[in-house]
Image: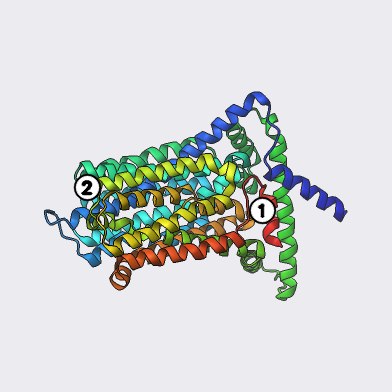
Amino acid sequence: MEDSEKNSENKINHCLFNEEVEVPEFSKFKSTLAQFFAALAFGSLFLDVGMFLALPTIVIAALQNPENKSFVMTREQASWFGSIFFVAQPLGCIISGLIQDSRGRKFCMLLINLPWVAGIMLIYCSKSIIELYLAGTLIGFGIGIMEAPMFSYIGESIQPQLRGILSSMAGAMLNLGFIIEYFLGAIMNWRSAIIITSFFPVVSFLLILLIPESPIWLVSKGRVRDAEKSLCWLRGWTSPRHVQTELAASIDHLELNRKERVRKMSIMMVEYHKILPSDIVENQQVQKEISLLHRFEVFLQPQVMKPLRLIIFYFFVSHCIGLTAMRPFYVSIFNRMNLPLTAHWVTVFCGSIQLLGSITCIAALPKLGKRKLTNVSLVPMILSCASLGLYTLLKLDVKWVPLTLFGVHLFSYTLGIGRIPWILMSELFPLEAKGLGVGFCAAASYFIWFFITKTYLNLEDFLSLPGVFFLYSSIGIIGAVYFYLKLPETEGKTLHEIHLHFMR
């Protein structure tokens, strides 16, 4: 009986997570097209995020300009506004990690547009630095809500052979958002740029309305008929008979998970000497306590803690070697480096190079895999970052050299290390810990982003600009060694195979 159940479980995992659920030849193109459209819909959210994260660059440059006729922003205020977008993001990540399991992935992706629109309009109407802080907090909170449901949706709805490519497409949309916002900042007043920016979340809301809810989440809520409709849509608007195998595997897999949870909860009841009282209300309260204890226990298991540590360290290295702390202060930094273009057009150049890197990532990821691509992108980043340190230390004046080094660095960043940890989040966590795991990792990422951005000006005062470049390149070297030793290859592997790796 036990062997039979194990064989059944292996068969279910193979069918559910691998990917080659049989699809009639004529519908494979339609299946890819449907999943591409879904990726375009949630990718539009990343385009919005790219525009929002580029906002501090153009707003800070405008309000610190001596010719500015609005209120003036001091250096300290600039450090706060450049980083405050990331203050509320951890809170949003954790909240979405909790509510996405009860209300659904699609609900959360629709919800985020409310704080986004409110924040954008508040920036447009702002007459004081406090209003800018509040607007940045609202936008950051919305970005935080987005992360967990979006990456859960990718892992649960997109077939494995398409997951890496379509996840990378979201990164390309992020960089497209940077280009659009930097371009707007180069050709018009910052308030006019804000007005145009406000239309993009509305378009994203309409696109998300068109895609179905995650079929795995629907099955977990007992909504099997809705899950069937969702799978039909995602597999190319096909008929129900073509998704029955995948649907049945989803149902059986979740049933096995449920039985395992019941077994563990029973053990916990004995361990904690919980005797369920006869009173119904008290009984329900005890069951809630046991359920919470079980969720905490699941979170501490190796298959959750190992990827958690790996992804958080990946984010730390990515933000440092990726020079993300410098982004809000690009205009000021570029002006000091005497580049051949005006600072605003250099930001457009940087955004374009990053988009090119993201597109290359889409093509390279299936061939190289995430492990090789991480190392391939890290090496030129370390070299270009150290070279920028030397250039600024020696106070050279060869205008195209720093521009070329920035180009190599930003291309390499979006080619690999800037995108891969976000893709890994959709793959590494088991289903029962996906919501909280993804939410916690995204929260950690944004906390790191906030901390290094807020302290960047102080770090530059302490180490000087060359010292910052040398520090970040050193962190990149440490990261390269760690990833070479610890990062497994997940490209082309089923979710079940990935989870087994971390259980060892």
Q: Residue furthest bottom?
A: 273
Picture quadrant where residue 286 is located: bottom right
Picture quadrant where residue 249 is located: top right
Q: Is residue 153 above or below residue 437?
A: above
**Residue at the image position 29 percent from the left and 51 percent from the top:** 55
The residue that label 1 is drawn on is 498
**Looking at the image, which is closer to me, 329 or 274?**
329
Say what amino acid the circle numbered 1 marks.
Ile
What kind of element bears circle 2? loop
State the count of labels: 2
Of marks 2 and 1, the one in the foreground: 2
How far apart marks 2 and 1 lie (CA) works out to 47 Å
Q: Is residue 126 above or below residue 297?
A: above
Q: Residue furthest right?
A: 1
**Residue at the image position 29 percent from the left and 63 percent from the top:** 394
- Badge 2 local density, few (<14 within 10 Å), some, or many (20+)? few
Image quadrant occupied by the C terminus: bottom right
Picture coordinates of residue 263 (x, y %)? 75, 62
Which numbered dot is residue 461?
Answer: none
Is any part of residue 386 visible from this angle? Answer: yes
Picture coordinates of residue 415 (x, y %)? 47, 47
**Looking at the image, which is closer to me, 24 or 185?**
185
Q: Earlier in the sequence, mark 2 or mark 1?
A: 2
The residue that label 2 is drawn on is 342
**Residue at the image position 63 percent from the left and 26 percent from the top:** 27
- Badge 1 local density, few (<14 within 10 Å), some, or many (20+)? some
Picture coordinates of residue 222 (x, y %)? 65, 46
Say what amino acid the circle numbered 2 marks.
Thr
Left or right of residue 117, residue 503 in this image: right
**Looking at the image, which is closer to me, 496 or 361?**
361
What kind of element bears circle 1? helix
